[in-house]
Image (tube, rainbow, N blue to C red):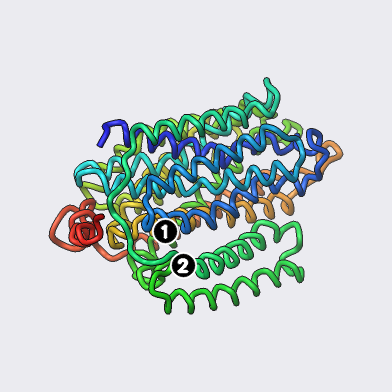
Amino acid sequence: MSRLTVPVLAFCGAVVAVMQTLVVPLLPHVPDLTGATPGAAGWLVTVTLLTGAVCTPVLGRAGDMYGKRRVLLASLGVLTAGSVLCALTSAIGVLIAGRALQGAALAVIPLGISIIRDALPPERVLPSIALMSSTLGIGAAIGLPVAAVVVENFDWHTMFWASAALGVLDVVLVLCFVSESPLRTPGRFDVIGTLGLAATLVGTLLAITQGAQWGWASARTLGLLGGSLLVGLLWARYELRTASPVVDLRVSARPAVLLTNVAGLLIGFAFYANSLVTAQLVQEPTSTGYGLGASIVVSGMCLLPGGLAMVALSPVSARISATYGPRTALALAAAVMALGYVVRFFTSHSLGLIVAGATVVASGTAIAYSALPALVMRAVPVTETGAANGLNTLMRSVGQACCSAVVAAVLAHVTFTVGGRSAPTLHAYLLIFLIAAGAALAALVVTLLLPSARPGGPAGNVAVTTAAPAARETMT
């Protein structure tokens, strides 16, 4: 195995994470640039969430069955194709299609984690997956300021050409430095289960992300939620009866896996509030009495220290997990995130203190995102790591979707009139900080309910050591 394998996989993960937030600074300008409505422009973010949610567990399962490197390369190819499609057009429909392809590549991160687990010796697994998992937050923190600089200084298509070039570079690096894992999960791919999962997720996430616009009590929103619930129940019944399910619900129902996924959802919620609110808060005009009137670039730069902190803390998190166990690391992370929002609650008038609070939250996120895959891999067979990590990544995305809906609802309804326009009050932002802190504390409670590591070895190595016999049985 090449010593560049982990850096290459981490780079791929960071590129994919950047794609998720790439268009956020562009959204206010999309109606003027494309002639689209603001609602249609919002789909440039929503569609990546939908395709990412569906493809992450599905491609994780495909990687377990057909080869993780092969599926990783396919995901990076789809990302590159989506980037080129966006770079070549100003039509909103085509842009949404391209963004859908970019979102499908979110599976790169759980696939990379699974390759690391399969290929590395036990002592190197925790530090490497800590770095790989943290790229989801690192890329988001770095992507916003970089995209803001591009939007202000270059033609907006440039950022899509740049992302296409990075996608090609990712493919070349993987071909050169990442070997295929020999582990395979036997069986046939669950097409019916995949379609049922897709229908359930798309319906649920559509209702969550569009509920504020459609009305939470509207027939469309309630119909989607009800239909998704019905399809989800039928899907679960089918998955329990099929020999090779796309999601093994029996494994997922184990307390160690279920509670880890619930914690992942809550951590995803708490993390995303930091990214969503910071840029908007500092851009609010000074006429509001609390806004700083900062530019898009300055607002994006507020998240950059947090991204750098996540890079620095990923090995620290791995050391905490190896020494005290990933459950302790996740509990510490949730507490740090809650503390960060307490700081933010009392320091929302100063740019420096806003950055400090955002960095504390990002630091907790780095530790959490490093501990979550360690908890997952401790609890599932080695042949299911791709699907299991994909499901955990999905739960973080669902948490982010819920956070986006809550933030939009609070900022839209807790308002006042200033300078002839409606703007969120300071209390709206403070309420969001309290809600996010509550999500972090709920994640702490869920983490404390997780079963303790089995005796007989370091907590961080349990998944690797206990799963070794299964791994040998499935080598090809």
Whole-Å distance between the Cαs marked 2 and 1? 9 Å
Q: Nearer the viewer, residue 142 or 420?
A: 142
| Residue lying furthest top | 153
Q: Position of residue 127 (x, y in %)?
A: 28, 41
Q: Nearer the viewer, mark 2 or mark 1?
A: 2
Checking the image for residue 61, the label placed there is 1
Residue type, label 2: Asp
Determine the residue positioned at 43% across, 66% down: 247
Disc with the residue nearer the chain's start (2 vs 1): 1
Q: Are marks 2 and 1 in contact (CB under 8 Å)?
A: yes
Judging by the rendered image, the residue that carries numbered circle 2 is: 190
Residue occupying image coordinates x 61% and y 34%:
349
Describe the element under mark 1 as helix, strand or loop.
helix
* Circle 1: residue type: Arg
The image position of residue 301, as x and y in percent, is 56, 28
Q: Is residue 230 above or below residue 77?
A: below
Left or right: 237 in relation to 178: right
Tell me which residue sits at (56%, 38%) in the image. 19
